[in-house]
Image (spheres, helix red, strand yellow):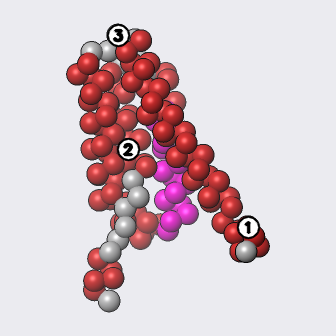
Amino acid sequence: MARSLLPLSALLLGSAFLLFAGGVNGLILPIRGEAEGFTAASLGLLGTGWAIGYVAGCMRTPGLVARVGHIRAFGVMCAIAAIAVLLSLVLITPWVWIPVRALSGFCFARGRDDRRKLVE
């Protein structure tokens, strides 16, 4: 059993780190925004931006995975999510954080392409 999980361990560990970091980022950004003096409306738009990005990612990710493969798509999405977190550290304004959170939500989307199953 352990031998069959060994090839997947890097992917599972990478996914675990990614999800943990995304969760911590989602908790810390509103706290940091409040400390920076962001309005309640802009803090609410942070969550809305993430949700909009997530829905857009669910719609676009299947096509991306179909074109380039799941490994490349996973790598690109991880890199973009890391860049989004770093941008939120460098540029401290709500009008930058909202699209950055939408970009982060896009990267965390796990879309599935069930259309092929319906055709086959």
Q: Specify the quadrant that holds the N terminus.
A: bottom right
Q: Residue at x 75, y 70 (%)?
A: 2
Which residues are the magenta region?
69-85
Label 3 vs label 2: CA separation? 23 Å
Residue 69 vertical position relative to residue 115 in the rendered view, above or below:
above
Which is more N-terminal, label 1 or label 3? 1
Is disc 1 in contact with disc 2, using a CB cutoff of under 8 Å?
Answer: no
Q: How far across and how far down the image is residue 55, in percent? A: 29, 51
Q: Residue furthest right?
A: 3
What residue did someone put label 1 on?
A: 6
Can you tell which mark lies on residue 105?
2
Q: Which mark is residue 36?
A: none
| Disc 1 from disc 2: Cα separation | 29 Å
Q: Residue at x 73, y 67 (%)?
A: 6
Check disc 3 and report the residue beneath it. 37
Amino acid type at circle 2 is Gly
Can residue 88 be seen? no
Q: Amino acid at mark 3?
A: Gly
Badge 1: few (under 14), some or many (20 or more) residues near its Cα, within 10 Å?
few
Q: Which badge, 3 or 2, comes first in the chain's sequence?
A: 3
Q: Is residue 30 above or below residue 51?
A: above
* Residue 37 figure quarter: top left
Q: Which secondary structure, mark 1?
A: helix
Q: Residue sitting at 33 percent across and 48 percent down?
A: 54
Asked if the residues shown at circle 3 and circle 2 are in contact, with their CB atoms under 8 angstroms apart, the answer is: no
Residue 97, image x, y percentages: 36, 27
Quarter-wise, where is residue 71 in the image? bottom right
> Badge 2: few (under 14), some or many (20 or more) residues near its Cα, within 10 Å?
many
Examine the image and state in which quarter residue 92 appears.
top left
Please state if 9 lies on the left or on the right of 62 as rendered: right
Q: Nearer the viewer, residue 92 or 23?
A: 23
Q: Amino acid at mark 1?
A: Leu
